[in-house]
Amino acid sequence: MRLVSLLPSATEIVYALGLGDDLVGVTFECDEPPAARSTKTVVVGGRDTRAMTPAEIDDYVRTQMAAGGDLYTLHADALAGLAPDLILTQDLCRVCALPSGHVDDALAHLGCRADVLSLDPHTLPEVLDTFEEVAGAVGVPERGRDLTARLKQRLDRVAAAVEGRPRPRVTVVEWVDPPFGAGHWVPDLVVAAGGEPVAARPGQRSVQVSWAELTAPEPEIVLVTPCGYHLDGAVRQAEAVTAHFPGAQVWAMDGDGLVVRPGPRLIDGVEAMAAILHPGAVPPAPTGAVARVA
């Protein structure tokens, strides 16, 4: 089966299922594993925001959305040339990836008969379910069950290690200018790591909030996990918010690698969070995953 992934997390799922050889198309943001972008056809492009500040990125996104514009460009001819059997996309967040409706319209215009599977999890259990969805759609359901079982075993080991320990109050900052609190599956990660998420919206969209809303619960630990950034960018943003949390530990995390993409590496994120919240109870986080800034 010829597969096309229109979001980075789906690309990671495909490789985790051992289906990398079947993947023929990806997006410009698919950077894990590194071979994905370098060896596959890029069928979705977008603006390079690496030189922009968080405030500039937020302004760009809001302006595009208000004008009815698109944040991503589907290279329809390239997609058609791949003759895919299954396209993996999403409707969860227009800021994160191309919506499935755009894909359906393009396929109808091209006369392409590919199936489209939209992956739209809101909680950690739903994220795990998507692995089996993809495996089932490709015809290898046993691989999905095996992957999910292995990841749940890792979650069980973390749960056993932190059982009975005090749960620190944890605020997760998903964006810093303007500030956004944690939503969707991110509060579930904190719970799984042995923390108590505060100023959070479990299973709901992350929304803009005030700094007062983030600081009011008096968090003991603050995790800065900006969408679209790995650890180096997260450190810069974490350094900019420390003044808001004078009584808390402030940590930066590799947002894209560990927290915001709903793929298999979320379990790496739980393990890294547990190492922050309960040092000594679990192995330390690997180099490049987290960094304390205050």
Image: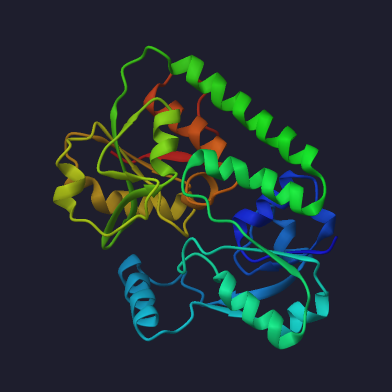
Quarter of the image for residue 44 reads bottom right
Residue sticking out furthest to the top? 164
User: Is residue 75 visible from the viewing direction of this image?
Assistant: no
- In the rendered image of this protein, does residue 141 appear above or below residue 5? above
Say whether residue 123 is left or right of residue 277. right
Q: Quadrant of the N terminus?
A: bottom right
Q: Residue at x 44, y 33 (%)?
A: 273
Say whether residue 35 is left or right of residue 284. right
Q: Residue at x 51, y 52 (%)?
A: 256
Q: Quadrant of the C terminus?
A: top left
- In the rendered image of this protein, does residue 190 appear above or below residue 76? above
Quarter of the image for residue 43 reads bottom right
Q: Residue 73 location in percent, x, y?
A: 58, 80
Q: Residue at x 63, y 69 (%)?
A: 28
Q: Residue 98 location in percent, x, y?
A: 56, 71
The residue lying toward the viewer, choosing from 224 and 113, is 113
- In the rendered image of this protein, does residue 70 appear above or below residue 243? below
Total residue callouts: 0
- In the rendered image of this protein, does residue 163 appear above or below residue 106? above
User: Is residue 52 visible from the viewing direction of this image?
Assistant: yes
Q: Residue 4 location in percent, x, y?
A: 73, 65
The residue lying toward the viewer, choosing from 92 and 251, is 92
Q: Residue at x 51, y 22 (%)?
A: 158
Quarter of the image for residue 38 reads bottom right
Q: Residue 218 location in percent, x, y?
A: 17, 35
